[in-house]
Image: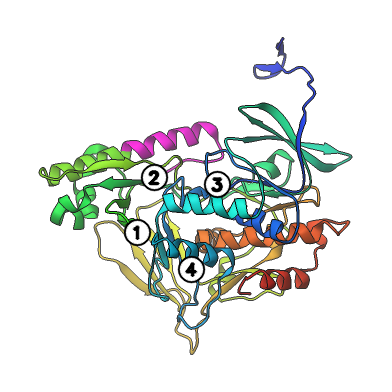
Amino acid sequence: MLRMNVSTRPALLEPARHTPVVYEADVCVLGGSCTGLFAAIRAARLGARVVIVEKDNCFGGVATTAMVNVWHSLWDTLGERQIIAGLTEETMDRLDRRGAMRRHERTNPSRGFTFNSEELKIELDELAREARLKIYLHTQFVAPILEDGRLVAVAIENKSGRGAIRARMFIDATGDADLVARLGGETYFANQLQPATACVRVGGWATLGEAGKRVGDLIREHGPARDLPPTFAWGGLVPGSDTYMLAATRVHGINPADADQLTHGEIEGRRQIRAILDILREAAPESRLSIEALPSRLGLRESRHVRAVYSLTGDEVLSGASFPDAVVQSCYRVDIHHQDKPGITLRYLDGTEEYHRPGYPSERRRWRPETPTNPTFYQVPYRCLLPRGVPGNVIVAGRMIDMDPLAHAAVRVMVNMNQTGEAAGVAAVLALDSAGGFPTVNTDTLREALRRGGSAL
């Protein structure tokens, strides 16, 4: 029986319970986005016994359940040097063999690959099966379990009830640093979290005719009457399909780490999708548009961050800084989706900057004077993945790593987060033989192990 506990706010006192240990592993990964799955696969390929916990019904995160079907270039800004490889490249090559992926120019700043998100779901299943992972889908991380100050297990809940997973190393790939936060580690939120986007896959797109080329203009013209914020519209046909993936919504002012705000954001995103399609149908009355798929989660750009051993700065990104413990390489531009004003700001490594405001000419300028040479890529150090205030057998991977808002606006994209997962997975295996855990992993050894596994460091 549950009893009321006297406190400043109503609460219930749960009786003590015996929680069965449902699995024991070397490495436990919380979160099954590509970031988390790639962490699990890299650890398993090195011989570790790995379990992965995912709250949804599939792997892939933003790339599948949020339907954002674009990954960025694996090459530097000049298209001369491949700076990213590993499981990102391997996965795209596998989709290519199935005709489920389209390559773009190496120097395209907006997209390197467009893929079929549904095919990706199945391909990720295959990768997980080949790695012999223990998989828990439809499973929610509940709480950490500590003994003598060390994390020894995590409590989970699923259709079978509550259980515990014991492991020696833990990777927090939840996107919101849920494990670190519940351990009492140091976390923070940016002053203005970047807004979220709900994508949609639309059938009958070709029947729009000329209206299909004016989506952004139509939303700007008719959106205010439907309470739509100023926005940009982008998308494209899904490879191997005549369905169009459209990203044109803008959900402002929500913190995805807050349950009530996340709920509001999900519903608001779907409301905006319907309003946009109504606008298109009115503009092209003879069209035959249909919603083929809605995302099972918002496309989230930012929520909780960890305070780590090191915080990457925007200046370091834009100057192409290198680090002896680098585990991520990228050339993706700074891409700030503003909360406090309409539009986005794009800042490039060549010193130029563009501000795009819906319905207005783009503003182009330089953010720094011209220089004889420009950096062509930047790096992210391993130290950004090491959270403060938690046991040494915990590491993070994903958008919650420690970086200032300018750096986050560049580093947050999936091809970069995939690399943080691979680094965390390899580090977990190395940490198994280290009494100090993740903070004492030799980063030269880590980088060499990543290279042997296919990374382009």
Q: Earlier in the sequence, mark 3 or mark 1?
A: 1
Label placed on residue 303: 3
Residue pointed to by mark 2: 198
Looking at the rendering, the stretch of residues picked out in magenta corresponds to 251-271
Q: Which of the numbered marks, if any, corresponds to residue 332?
A: 4
Q: In this view, does 106 lie above or below 16?
A: below
Where residue 430 sits, quadrant-wise, is bottom right
Q: Do the residues labelled 4 and 1 touch (CB within 8 Å)?
A: no
Q: Position of residue 243 (x, y in %)?
A: 29, 51
Name which residue lies at 76% across and 17% down. 15
Residue 339 appears anywhere in the view: no
C-alpha gap between disc 3 and disc 1: 31 Å
Disc 3 residue type?
Answer: Ser
Distance of mark 3 from mark 4, alpha carbons? 20 Å
Q: What element carries label 4?
A: loop
Upstream in the sequence, badge 2 or badge 1?
2
Give the labeled residue for mark 1.
239
